[in-house]
């Protein structure tokens, strides 16, 4: 699917660095428009973690808004992570770019001045395939436990009273 695209994540990332270096808002708008176009076609790429120099997830781009790329995690599926994430362009790489730790280091070296966090911050998902957890009903155990304790104390008093009677009768 990625072969017919007018641009790539690598090209847009390089344009972003260039736009920041020359402080050209026009170039920045071109990067934003390129990301929107990639989102429209569901462009597939990788999310990389520069801290561990490894590919973290395969993602599909969904759009661009407020300086973040909206992406859906496709693989590996992780119930601990929300399936849709808002990611910085700096942590995205084309498949061919993220083939090994050395190539990921090269990407980082080109972006290091502009990266705030080496590991992307991901939104947490809900366990159970992102279905809302059922609300727990208040437990009735505390009431039952209190009732059981009352019966235990009463039983103990009856045993003590019977023991006292036995001692009193045995002593005469």
Image (spheres, rainbow, N blue to C red):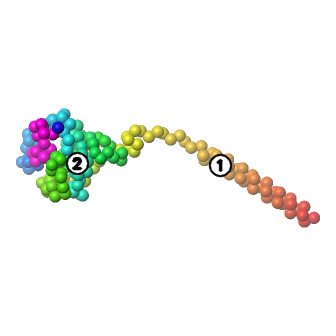
Tell me where the magenta segment starts and ends, as one range. 2-15
Left or right relative to 108: residue 84? right
Where in the figure is residue 100, as x and y percent of width and height? 18, 55
Q: Residue at image x 79%, y 56%?
A: 159
Q: Is residue 23 above or below residue 38?
A: below
Residue that mark 2 sits on: 47
Identify the secondary structure beneath mark 1.
helix
- What percent of the width, then of the height, locates residue 60? 23, 40
Residue at image mark 1: 146
> How many residues crowd around disc 2 within 10 Å: few (fewer than 14), some, or many (20 or more)?
many
Q: Is residue 41 magenta?
A: no
Would you say the magenta stretch is mainly helix, strand or loop?
Answer: helix
Q: Residues within 10 Å of mark 1 (few under 14, many from 20)?
A: few
Upstream in sequence: badge 1 or badge 2: 2
Residue 76 appears anywhere in the view = yes
Horizontally, is 4 left or right of 154 in the view? left
Coordinates of residue 154 in the picture (x, y in percent): 75, 52
């Amino acid at each position: 699917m990625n072969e017919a695209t007018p641009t790539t994540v690598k090209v847009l990332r390089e344009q972003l660095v260039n736009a920041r270096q020359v402080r050209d808002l026009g170039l920045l708008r071109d990067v934003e428009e390129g990301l929107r176009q990639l989102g429209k076609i569901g462009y597939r790429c990788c999310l990389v973690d520069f801290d561990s120099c490894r590919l973290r997830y395969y993602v599909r781009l969904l759009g661009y808004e407020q300086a973040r790329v909206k992406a859906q995690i496709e693989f590996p599926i992780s119930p601990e992570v929300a399936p849709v994430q808002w990611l910085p362009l700096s942590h995205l790489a084309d498949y061919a770019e993220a083939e090994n730790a050395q190539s990921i280091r090269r990407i980082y070296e080109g972006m290091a001045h502009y990266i705030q966090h080496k590991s992307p911050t991901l939104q947490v998902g809900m366990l159970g395939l992102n279905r809302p957890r059922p609300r727990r009903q208040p437990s009735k155990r505390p009431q039952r436990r209190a009732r059981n304790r009352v019966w235990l104390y009463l039983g103990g008093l009856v045993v003590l009273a019977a023991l006292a009677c036995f001692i009193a009768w045995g002593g005469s």
